[in-house]
Image (cartoon, rainbow, N blue to C red):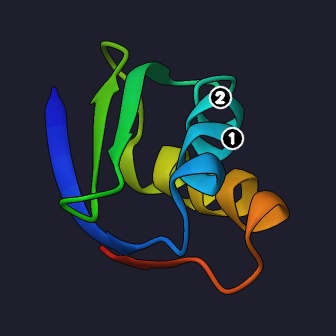
């Protein structure tokens, strides 16, 4: 399953770093952050709990940019 979320990211470099960090979260098959569109797209592994995975994705992104905002 693939879902897109509106996000607020301050810079393109931060978006790249958050993408790398979020891609390491269990349950994430693929992730991309489009800085210009302010969109985060996540493809989940089969059988993954979307809410639990997104909670971990947000934690991973906040390690890079503490004021990271995502609209779940």
Q: Is residue 5 left or right of residue 21?
A: left
Name the mark on residue 20: 2
Q: Is residue 58 left or right of residue 6?
A: right
Where's the N terminus, which quadrant? top left
* Residue 8 drawn above or below residue 30: below
Where's the C terminus, which quadrant? bottom left
Q: Decide: marks 2, 1 in contact (CB < 8 A)? A: yes
Residue 47 in the image: state x and y as whole percent: 34, 20
- Which residue is disc 1 drawn over? 17
Residue 66 in the image: state x and y as whole percent: 77, 79
Quarter of the image holding residue 25?
Answer: top right
* Residue 6 drawn above or below residue 43: below
User: Residue reaching furthest right?
Assistant: 63
Q: Residues within 10 Å of mark 2 (few under 14, many from 20)?
A: some
3D distance between C-alphas at marks 2 and 1: 5 Å
What residue do we see at 30% from left, 13% from top?
A: 46
Residue 13 in the image: state x and y as whole percent: 62, 48
* Residue 7 drawn above or below residue 50: below
- Please count the marks in the image: 2
Element under disc 1: helix
What residue do we see at 25% from left, 58% from top?
A: 36
Residue 33 in the image: state x and y as whole percent: 38, 44
């Amino acid at each position: 399953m693939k879902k897109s979320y509106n996000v607020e990211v301050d810079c393109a470099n931060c978006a790249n770093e958050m993408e790398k960090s979020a891609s390491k979260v269990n349950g994430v098959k693929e992730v991309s952050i489009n800085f210009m569109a302010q969109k985060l797209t996540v493809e989940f592994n089969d059988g993954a709990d979307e809410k639990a995975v997104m909670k971990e994705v947000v934690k991973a992104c906040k390690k890079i940019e503490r004021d990271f905002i995502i609209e779940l």
